[in-house]
Amino acid sequence: MAKKPTVSVIIPTYNRAHLIGRAIKSVLNQTYQDFELIIIDDGSTDNTEDIIRQFQEKDKRIKYKKHDKNKGGSAARNTGIKNSKGKYIAFQDSDDEWLPNKLEKQMKIFKKESPNLGIVYTGFYRIKDSEKEYIPSHEIVKKEGRIYEDLLKESFITTQSILVRKECFKKVGIFDEKLPRLQDWELVIRLSKYYDFKCIDEPLLISYYNTDSISANHKALIEAHELILTKHYKNFNNYKKILSRHYFDLGRILYLDEDLISGRRYFIKAIKKYPLNIKYSLSYLVSFFGPKTFNKVTKIYHKFKYYFCNRQK
């Protein structure tokens, strides 16, 4: 009987024939080699399968499965999880790139930490056009341990960065296929309720922004954010200051997208949850002067806040 791999690496892909090769190579070039690579083709209509088959002929650790129709990234990842044999699960995206020692560094931590450690994640570079941003930023103070409250505040962990004990999925479930975006944030919120996180605070992968990616879809972002707040409302409502900020952020995005009525509705929700924040009330009042004025006042506010904070240091 063949030995089971320790790690199952899952790559969902859809019409990425021009990029999938880079992602596959970045997995195969890992210094840690005890893994299987499961590629889920989510109904591609280009020659993605041909590219994958070429790699598969040279490396038998590569498993290929194709959906008969496009079901979305979450469904593809879930298919990968269900077909995995490893004790640990890692995810890569078909248009991104791991650095060679990513898995090795994550596995070293799992071998020496307590059984309650469920997730080891890494920092990463997000590249958009010519700009490079490191995540998680220095502003996020608590990045490991029990970080449930911190993850309710904001999303700073991407799917491609995590290595998860497979048993964790039995406890919290797999990816929510109803979400058009932010599936990684919603999953780690659930995981953080029960498991410790460990952060390797250095860039061990590169995430590339593509205009045809789901991450570029503004409408999907708003829909997903609303769905997550509804799904986890009881949890968010325990932290009213956090919930109010999410309401405000949604209001600002909707307002600047010229959905003025929905934007103001969320400003009012933010004010009701946390009346002490002057910014929320000010934004609501300024919203009646139109998006151009709203934008100008917002920029002035942030410049003033930046200046004031620097003077305090």
Image (cartoon, helix red, strand yellow):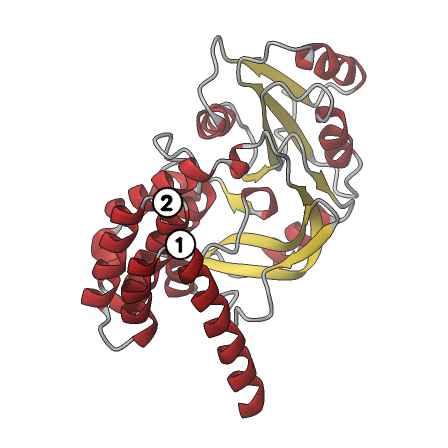
Q: Quadrant of residue 194?
A: bottom left
| Residue on which disc 2 sits | 258
User: In this orientation, which residue lies closer to the viewer: 39 or 6?
Assistant: 39
Instruction: Specify whether 55 is left or right of 108.
Output: right
**Mark 2 touches mark 1? (CB < 8 Å):** yes
**Residue 233 in view of the camera:** yes
What element does badge 2 sit on?
A: loop
Q: Amino acid at mark 2?
A: Glu
How many numbered markers are drawn? 2
Residue at figure coordinates x 36%, y 46% from the top left: 225
| Circle 1 residues within 10 Å: few <14, some 14–19, many ≥20 | some
What element does badge 1 sit on?
A: helix
Q: Quadrant of residue 3?
A: top right
User: In this orientation, which residue lies closer to the viewer: 110 or 294?
Assistant: 294
| Circle 2 residues within 10 Å: few <14, some 14–19, many ≥20 | few
> Residue 151, relative to residue 72: is it above or below?
below
Outermost residue, bottom direction? 312
Query: What is the x, y in percent for residue 121?
Result: 58, 53
Query: What is the x, y in percent for residue 109?
Result: 63, 57
User: In this orientation, which residue lies closer to the viewer: 229 or 279?
Assistant: 279
| Residue on which disc 1 sits | 291
Estimate the spatial distance between the alpha carbons at disc 2 and disc 1, rounded to whole Å: 7 Å
- In which quadrant of the rendered image does the C terminus lie? bottom right
Residue at figure coordinates x 78%, y 31% from the top left: 25
**Residue 194 in view of the camera:** no
First reached walking from the N terminus: tag 2 or tag 1: 2
Query: What is the x, y in percent for residue 159?
Result: 54, 43
Q: Amino acid at mark 1?
A: Pro
Residue at figure coordinates x 59%, y 29% from the top left: 212
Q: Which mark is residue 281?
A: none
